[in-house]
Each structure stands twice: as C-alpha cells, then as structure tokens.
C-alpha cells in the first residue's frame, strides 16, 4: 500500500516562505491533482516529495515510512517534467529504459518493460528515434513512459501536458486516466488547467501562496467552491459575480436582480443586510419569455458561438455585465431586450469582505445581495 502524507511542511528560500505549514494526505492508488496559479508552490511540493530539495520543517511519509531524510534514489518515485528532460544522445528506447537499468533489471526485463509502456502510450513505433526527431507529443509520451517504466508505487507528474498542442492535450485527458489506472500507482499531478484537473483528478487540491485552499472531488470544487477566487478558477466562461444585499421576508431571504425579487428558500435570515456577492455560473442562466415568473430583464449586447455552446453577453438594468451560456443550436436572442431565469439551486453566496463562501442555496447556509 502506497500512501503519501505531508505533515506541516515548511519550505523557505531566504526570507520567502514558499510552502507554509502545509499538510496533505494522498490515498493508495489515488490520483490527486495539485491545481493553482504559477507561483502557488506546486512544483516545489513535488520536488520535496521526490527528495530533490529538503523542507525546513515537517515530515514526508511514503507508505507510512518517514522519508524526509532519505535520498531521492531510495524513495521509489517516478517523475515526469513539463520540459520533457530527455537525454538528447539516447533514443526513445534508451530514455525509457533508464529506470529499469538503474534497478539492474535483466536485458529481457528491460525490453519487455519498455515495450509495455511504449505500447500503452502509443509510441512503440518511434523507439529508435532520438528526441530531436520526435514531435512534442512524442517527447511528452516518452518522458511519461520513462516515469512509468520502473512501475514506481508513487508517480509525480509536473504539468506534463503544458508544452504539447491542444489536440494532444485533449487526447491525453482521455487517455491518461486509463494509463494511470493500468499502472496502479498513487499519483500526484500538477496542472494550471482546470479542465485537466477536472478530467484527471480523483480529488483536487487547490493551492495558492503556499497553502491548500480547498481539497475535494472535482464535483465538490465546482459545485461548492470555498471562496470567490476558487469559483473564478473553475468554469469557462467564468462565473458571474454581482454585489447583492439580501432581505429577510416572510417567505425566505430574497435578493434583487435587475429590480426583480428572487427568493432563495433555506437561506438563514441573519444574512439580511450584509454586503455579499452572488455567484451565478453562465450555464445556470437561461433565456425565458417575458412574463415568466422570476424573469429578469436584460439587454443583450453580443453573442459568441464557441462550438459546443453559445455565450451571450448581457447587461442588467444597472449596466452590470452578465454572461449566459447555452448549448449550441439552442435558440436565443442575439441582440435587444430579453429575459433570463436563474437556477437558484446553483447560486453561490459569498461574503464580500472575506470572499469566503457563505452558502450555496440548497446545500449550505448564507445569502447575498444588493440590487444588480
């Protein structure tokens, strides 16, 4: 059983704290995605786990064994980097074989191991090519195959798809879960691409400023972001955020959107009068006929087709921009006056001062609003 535990890890460079008392548990066989902006500390965390650098404080346990002071070559880890890091004087076969050679495997075992992972990653036809003769996609798969070849119990992948083209990124999002499942390793995967995080992670740990801000399944993160910043990071187009001040009424707490009263049942009355922000994902809004109960008047400014969906930019009566997303081919206004309805069950409510999630209607407590 291979688990990874980080306990109160602190890493500093001079006076700059890169990782600040960070703790994390990764389950046996789990793919955990570290997601966050550049500078969040994701790669430093991987380098610490790999044993390339040492923490100032804290412990690193792999399979329950303290590895904090163990040299990198004795940690049983495979790692793939975003810049490929292939040996230029070796062909693809030789690059992939390096971890097997380091384990002093027999020639037959090396050949079998290389061909196994090369076939899995569909690069068995380029094994005699050196890196300069490989496409970026083939280089990436070669680097990943090298990390997999030694069948490490713990696999660290540092944004491995960042330098490949969009088509390959899409294909690898589909293929990698199968490849990783076949490997059976515990995986820590770094990315700045939220779609990649959602596609690959059993769980996602959202990082910023050397801390983990939220950890949960992709559904947890998307459907209940811990704060406004995380809500902004997940979703395309981005979430709509409107200042609101909730009102407590006999039938529940309400907010005003374009002077239309929207009741959010289940929201506690003590949020009334507070400065809050309502978060509405574009796909949680839909165009409806005038006269529909709860219909909110807007002015349609522009429409952008994006293959599988169409995104509309509209303005509320107070000139606030709001995005509405609908499936491609679904009818909707391209300009002029229109009305939208809100899926209240998908609304997020945040504290305006702290940015923290107060409530999401139907699953949490809280509310927000000033007229939008």
Image (cartoon, grey):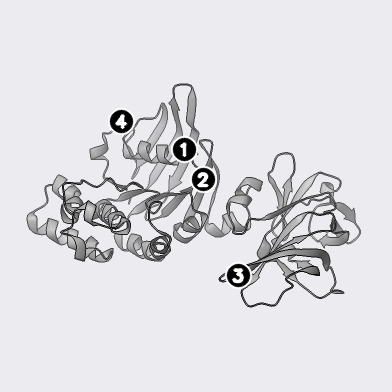
Q: Nearer the viewer, mark 4 or mark 3?
A: 3
Packing grade of label 3 (10 A; few <14, some 14-19, many >=20) is: some
Packing grade of label 2 (10 A; few <14, some 14-19, many >=20) is: many
Measure the alpha-carbon separation of dots 1 and 2: 9 Å
Residue 206, image x, y percentages = 53, 46
**Residue shown at 80% from the left, 52% from the top:** 268
Q: Quadrant of residue 164?
A: bottom left
Numbered tag placed on residue 240 in the rendering: none
* Disc 3, SS: strand
Closer to the chain start, of discs 4 and 2, is 2
Closer to the chain start, of discs 3 and 1, is 1
Q: Is residue 150 visible?
A: no
Measure the alpha-carbon separation of dots 4 and 1: 21 Å
Q: Which residue is mark 1?
A: 41
Measure the alpha-carbon separation of dots 3 and 1: 34 Å
Look at the picture and state if 371 lies above or below 37: below
Closer to the chain start, of discs 1 and 2, is 2
Foreground of the two, 215 or 123: 123
Residue 73, image x, y percentages = 23, 39
Measure the alpha-carbon separation of dots 2 and 3: 26 Å
* Disc 1, SS: loop
Residue 155, image x, y percentages = 33, 50
* Disc 2, SS: loop
Residue 88, image x, y percentages = 20, 46
Q: Quadrant of residue 284?
A: bottom right
Packing grade of label 1 (10 A; few <14, some 14-19, many >=20) is: many
Numbered tag placed on residue 309 in the rendering: 3
Q: Which residue is mark 4?
A: 69
Closer to the chain start, of discs 2 and 3, is 2
- Report whether 62 appears left or right of 150: right
Q: Do the residues bearing badges 1 and 2 touch, measured as CB atoms within 8 Å?
A: yes
**Residue shown at 88% from the left, 62% from the top:** 251
């Amino acid at each position: 059983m291979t688990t990874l535990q980080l306990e109160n890890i602190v890493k500093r460079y001079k006076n700059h704290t890169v990782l600040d008392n960070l703790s994390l548990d990764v389950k046996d066989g789990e793919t955990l995605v570290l997601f966050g902006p550049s500078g969040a500390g994701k790669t430093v965390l991987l380098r610490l786990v790999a044993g390339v650098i040492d923490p100032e404080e804290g412990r690193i346990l792999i399979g329950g064994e303290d590895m904090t002071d163990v040299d990198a070559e004795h940690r049983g880890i495979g790692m793939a980097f975003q810049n490929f890091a292939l040996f230029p004087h070796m062909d693809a076969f030789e690059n992939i074989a390096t971890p097997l050679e380091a384990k002093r495997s027999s020639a037959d075992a090396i050949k079998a191991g290389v061909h196994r992972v090369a076939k899995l990653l569909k690069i068995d036809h380029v094994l005699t090519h050196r890196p300069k003769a490989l496409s970026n996609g083939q280089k990436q798969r070669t680097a990943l195959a090298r990390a997999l070849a030694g069948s490490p119990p713990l696999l660290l992948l540092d944004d491995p798809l960042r330098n490949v083209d969009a088509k390959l990124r899409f294909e690898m999002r589909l293929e990698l879960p199968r490849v990783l499942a076949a490997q059976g390793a515990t995986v820590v995967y770094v990315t700045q691409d939220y779609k990649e995080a959602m596609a690959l992670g059993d769980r996602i740990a959202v990082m910023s400023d050397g801390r983990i801000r939220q950890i949960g399944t992709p559904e947890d993160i998307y459907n209940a972001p811990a704060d406004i910043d995380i809500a902004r990071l997940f979703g395309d187009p981005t979430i709509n955020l409107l200042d609101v001040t909730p009102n407590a009424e006999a039938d529940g707490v309400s907010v005003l959107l374009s002077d239309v009263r929207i009741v959010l049942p289940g929201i506690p009355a003590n949020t009334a009068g507070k400065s809050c922000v309502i978060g509405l994902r574009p796909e949680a809004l839909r165009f409806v006929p005038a006269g529909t109960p709860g219909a909110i008047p807007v002015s349609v400014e522009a429409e952008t087709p994006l293959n599988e969906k169409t995104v509309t930019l509209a303005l509320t009566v107070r000139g606030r921009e709001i995005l509405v997303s609908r499936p491609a081919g679904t009818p909707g206004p391209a300009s002029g006056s229109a009305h939208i309805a809100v899926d209240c069950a998908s609304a997020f409510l945040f504290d305006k001062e702290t940015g923290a999630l107060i409530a999401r209607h139907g699953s949490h407590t809280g509310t927000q609003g000033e007229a939008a």
